[in-house]
Amino acid sequence: MKNYHTPYYLIDQTQLLHNLKIIEAIRQVSGAKMVLALKCFSTWDVFNLIAPYLDGTTSSSPYEARLGYETFGKEVHAYSVGFSAQDIRRVRSIASKIIFNSISQLKQHQQAVASIPLGLRINPGISYSHYDLADPARLYSRLGVADLAQIHQVAPMLSGFMLHFNCENADFANFTTALAEIGERFGELLQSPQIQWLSLGGGIYFTNPHYPIMQFSELLRDFATKFAVQIYLEPGEAVITNSAELVTTVVDVMYNEVDIAIVDASIEAHMLDHLIYRTSPKLTTPESGSHRTIIAGRSCLAGDIFGEYYLKQCPEIGTQVRFADAAGYTMVKKNWFNGLAMPSILVRDLDGTIRQVRKFYYRDFKSNLS
């Protein structure tokens, strides 16, 4: 292998294909369609591998919608918490479906997109999330419409609905109960003659090693049959679970009551979700053991800490530290904080060949500013 300069994200197509095979099995049994959530993962170099196993992409902005249209080549679901008139002009020529977050948005833009299948996000009042920050049904949530009577009034303007109510939900029993409640509460609405599809959003962790794939698929199939709707799922993390690493190098080791290894990356700039949710990424290297070590980033933020780990020994300067499961919400959120070198993006193809598909330079940092 060529000695690439760290830091870099390394996407493994073999592991990616493993996840895609699970998706293929679910699609075949359930009849559900899958659209990739670009808010989680937008590294389009590997879309040629992903696209045959999914039905399209779902977006949260006009830029994501355009990216899906230009690089994926299938259905484009355009959603936004708040579309402007300019946004609507940008997406109406490329979207397969436009999904509005509120009745106000639907009424404001409906005439401009009357020829396109339209959807409305429903807030079912139930959800699964480990974090209030990510809970779509949290108190005073702005995500979706909760008033059933109001939804019935605008249903003739729509062809479907979207309910995004899960976040990293690996609990099949919980999902089963929630889906039954949705069927009970919204069943009459779903059986309206013009309603053709229902998106259950993303956040369902069906690529968890112990997830009951067949039961899940049959549950989706039976729900779709009962209410005569096409089910959509919007997987993000489930597509790219365990398919990438953030590869870094130790640039210094300090001691302040505990060994602190400083790497040439930053959790704030390169794995931001872990900082936001106060979690620590798992390591693939170095080897675990009993030696307490803090692994820290090299930005000036005092809390730029990847985590506290127990390793076989404290890593020395010049050795690699590899953070596991580094695809989701990393490359889409990476930033130029402190002017730190942004990680390159590498791909390990199915034949084992490693390619550098993107490298960032000072000119990228400069052009990102005024």
Image: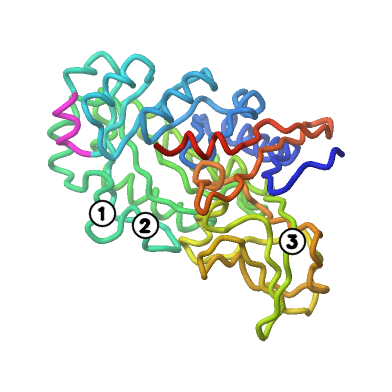
The magenta stretch spans residue 149 = no
Instruction: Determine the CA span between mark 1 and mark 2.
Output: 8 Å
From the image, tell me which residue sits under label 1: 141
The reply to whether callout 3 and callout 2 are in contact (CB within 8 Å) is no
Residue 195, percent from left and from top:
29, 27
The reply to whether callout 3 and callout 1 are in contact (CB within 8 Å) is no
What amino acid is found at the position of numbered circle 1 in the picture? Ser
Q: Give the range drawn in magenta.
A: 102-109
Residue 199, percent from left and from top:
39, 36
Q: In this view, does 238 lie above or below 49?
A: below
From the image, tell me which residue sits under label 3: 250
Q: Which of 6 and 137 is in front in this view?
A: 6
The magenta stretch spans residue 105 = yes
Left/right placement of residue 12 relative to residue 117 reads: right
| Residue at 72% from the left image edge and 51% from the top image edge | 247
State the mark number for residue 240: none
From the image, tell me which residue sits under label 2: 135
The reply to whether callout 1 and callout 2 are in contact (CB within 8 Å) is yes
Task: Give the image quarter of residue 130.
Answer: bottom left
